[in-house]
Image: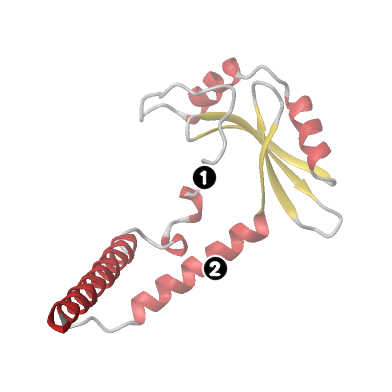
């Protein structure tokens, strides 16, 4: 009888070891796979657009050669709220002084981008749905400039590193 008990303990231990090794392998593969995409600091700040929101109006895809004036005219024909209403919605969300107001196509979403400068000088870019006037997103330009600085620092470090091999 003791032999069968010993065998059961050995098999149980081997099974537990196998499960632990498998879990470690899966975790390692997941971590290795996630490092394939560029770090956020390496992406150009101009290319970063918040896609966590969806507007009530979707912009049609225009030709790559479309001029900015043609794109602006196409977006204006889609927008159902005015710049004044977009400004008012932005100021209701963020206190301050309104600045530039532009109609934009951000990842297929037609939005008004309203810059609001707060009393302390912080500039907040407020995204307002061009169809219904809802505030979709807010981001501080200080955050964007910090991302620019981080990106520039990463690029400088990459340029000074010696190549491997």
Quarter-of-image position of residue 131? top right
Q: Position of residue 89 (x, y in %)?
A: 78, 32
Q: Nearer the viewer, residue 108 or 13?
A: 13
Q: Dividing the image into 4 quarters, which one contains the N terminus?
A: bottom left
> Residue at position x 85%, y 46% from top?
95
> Which residue position is annotated with label 2?
149
Q: Are marks 1 and 2 in contact (CB under 8 Å)?
A: no
Quarter holding residue 130: top right
Camera-near label (1 vs 2) is: 1
Image spot of residue 91 (x, y percent): 82, 38
Q: If you read the primary sequence from the N terminus, does the residue marked by circle 1 or circle 2 appear first?
A: 1
Residue 46 picture location, percent across and down: 50, 50
Q: Residue at x 80, y 58 (%)?
A: 121
Residue located beneath label 1 in the image = 49
Secondary structure found at label 2: helix
Q: How is the image coloured?
A: secondary structure
Above or below — where is 20 with respect to 55? below
Residue shown at the point (21%, 70%) measured from the top left:
15
Percent position (x, y) of residue 73? 55, 20
């Amino acid at each position: 009888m003791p032999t069968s008990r010993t065998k059961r303990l050995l098999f149980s231990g081997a099974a537990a070891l196998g499960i632990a090794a498998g879990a470690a392998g899966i975790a390692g593969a997941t971590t290795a796979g996630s490092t394939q995409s560029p770090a956020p600091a390496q992406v150009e700040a101009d290319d970063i657009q918040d896609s966590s929101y969806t507007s009530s109006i979707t912009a049609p895809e225009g030709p790559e050669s479309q001029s900015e004036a043609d794109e602006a005219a196409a977006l204006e024909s889609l927008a159902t709220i005015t710049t004044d209403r977009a400004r008012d919605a932005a100021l209701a969300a963020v206190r301050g002084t309104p600045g530039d107001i532009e109609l934009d196509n951000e990842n297929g979403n037609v939005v008004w981008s309203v810059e609001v400068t707060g009393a302390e000088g912080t500039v907040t870019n407020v995204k307002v749905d061009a169809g219904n006037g809802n505030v979709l997103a807010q981001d501080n330009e200080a955050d964007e400039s910090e991302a620019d600085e981080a990106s520039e620092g990463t690029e400088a470090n990459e340029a000074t590193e010696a190549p491997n091999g």
